[in-house]
Image (spheres, rainbow, N blue to C red):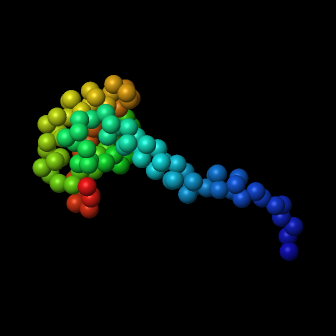
Amino acid sequence: MKNQSIKNITDILQNSSLTKIVQRANELNDLNQKIQKLLPNQYRGLYRIVNLVDNQLIFDVPNATIRQGLQLQQAEILALIRHDYPQVSECLFKVNPNFKH
């Protein structure tokens, strides 16, 4: 048997890909909660933020009707978001039929 040094489990977990995935999911969840508070009540529960990539905020919506409604108001929505998150340059609304309110 080789004599291996003892490693701290905390150090191993901090550098694992699972930890990075969990951290990213927590960041997106926090962002989703903050954005829900920024946008008007009429939109609450009709979307969820699924990603922020290259300053593009990606939303899931349950159907094409809601997607179209949000796209028609995209300029106003983007202005509200950019007030607190100026790095966001675009909103993308994607239909996800598995989305639950």
Residue 19 is left or right of residue 88, and the answer is right
Task: Please determine whether, in this image, residue 17 is positioned above or below residue 52.
Answer: below
Residue 4 is left or right of residue 90, and the answer is right
| Nearest to the observer: residue 101 or residue 13 | 101
Residue 20 is left or right of residue 3, and the answer is left
Place of residue 4 in the rendered image (x, y in percent of width and height, measured from the top left): 83, 64
Identify the residue at image location x=20%, y=30%: 75
| Nearest to the observer: residue 70 or residue 1 | 70
Assign the N terminus to one quadrant of the image: bottom right
Say which quarter of the image contains residue 101.
Answer: bottom left
Identify the residue at image location x=77%, y=58%: 7
Residue 66 is left or right of residue 51, and the answer is left
Task: Please determine whether, in this image, residue 72 is positioned above or below residue 4.
Answer: above
Place of residue 14 in the rendered image (x, y in percent of width and height, measured from the top left): 64, 51
Identify the residue at image location x=33%, y=25%: 83
Q: Is residue 94 visible?
A: no
Q: How many marks?
A: 0
Identify the residue at image location x=35%, y=49%: 50
Task: Please determine whether, in this image, residue 61 is positioned above or below residue 36.
Answer: below
Place of residue 35 in the rendered image (x, y in percent of width and height, measured from the top left): 34, 38
Q: Is residue 21 visible?
A: yes
